[in-house]
Amino acid sequence: MDPIPSTVKFCSACGNKVVQQVPEGDNRLRAYCHGCNTVHYSNPRVIVGCLPVYEGKVLLCRRAIEPRLGLWTLPAGYMENGETTMQGAARETWEEARARVHKQQLYRVFDLPHIDQIYMFYLCFLEDESFSPGPESQEVALFSEGDIPWDEMAFPVICDALKEYFDDRKNSNFPVRVSSAHWRKPSPIHYSAPSQVSCA
Ligand code: ZN
């Protein structure tokens, strides 16, 4: 798939308009500023999250924000500068579910090249039964396998990760899986899943 051109319009260093061109020695279009000869690279964004478990149940958050407002998801969000993926996953879990996690192990990586994103989920355990909704969550709850609200899940990747977890649990073996997902048309900026997601 061809890379999506940069959406940068103006140079963040000098304010001049940028042009899309292939810089010398490069092999793809970049946002280039002729005012100060700066190349503005655009690279994938990393979304880090947790699959937190407590006494056999999985912690899910009901989203209080768009996209997918009102639907359930695992705690996850954009990685910040200056943190590791593991720290970012734990931070997101605190911010969205006010829950502390430990024993994190990388469990699931989804490449989403059509929207220039990478999801990285850590399997982990809650330190205790203490949790509550953060500003981006309407509700936070623990679900046993039989109670997962499959018809109200926010994103297909969440369904995939949960189903794999419950399968792997039968064998007490949790290998790291990496796969790419393509379930909708490309969008250069924002993620927005189809209006109906069926995980059944
Ligand atoms: Zn410039």
Image (tube, helix red, strand yellow):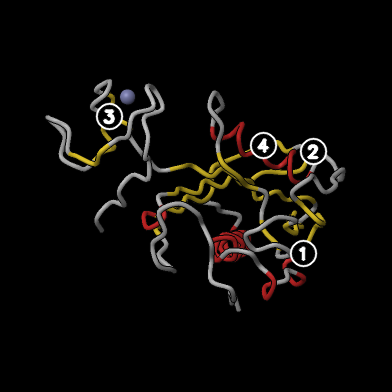
> Who comes first in sequence, dot 4 or dot 1?
4
Q: From the image, tell me which residue sits under label 1.
A: 144
Residue drawn at 60 percent across, 59 percent down: 165
User: Nearer the observer, disc 1 or disc 3?
Assistant: 3
Residue that extends furthest to the left in the rendered view of this protein: 25
Quarter of the image where ligand 1 sits? top left
Marks 1 & 3, CB-CB < 8 Å contact: no
Q: What's the amino acid at mark 1? A: Ser
Q: For mark 1, give the secondary structure.
A: loop
> Who comes first in sequence, dot 1 or dot 3?
3
| Disc ID at residue 127 | 2
Residue drawn at 59 percent across, 77 percent down: 198
> Who comes first in sequence, dot 3 or dot 2?
3
Seen in the picture, residue 97 relative to 140 is either above or below; the reply is: above
User: Nearer the observer, disc 4 or disc 1?
Assistant: 4
Distance (Cα) linking label 4 and label 3 = 38 Å
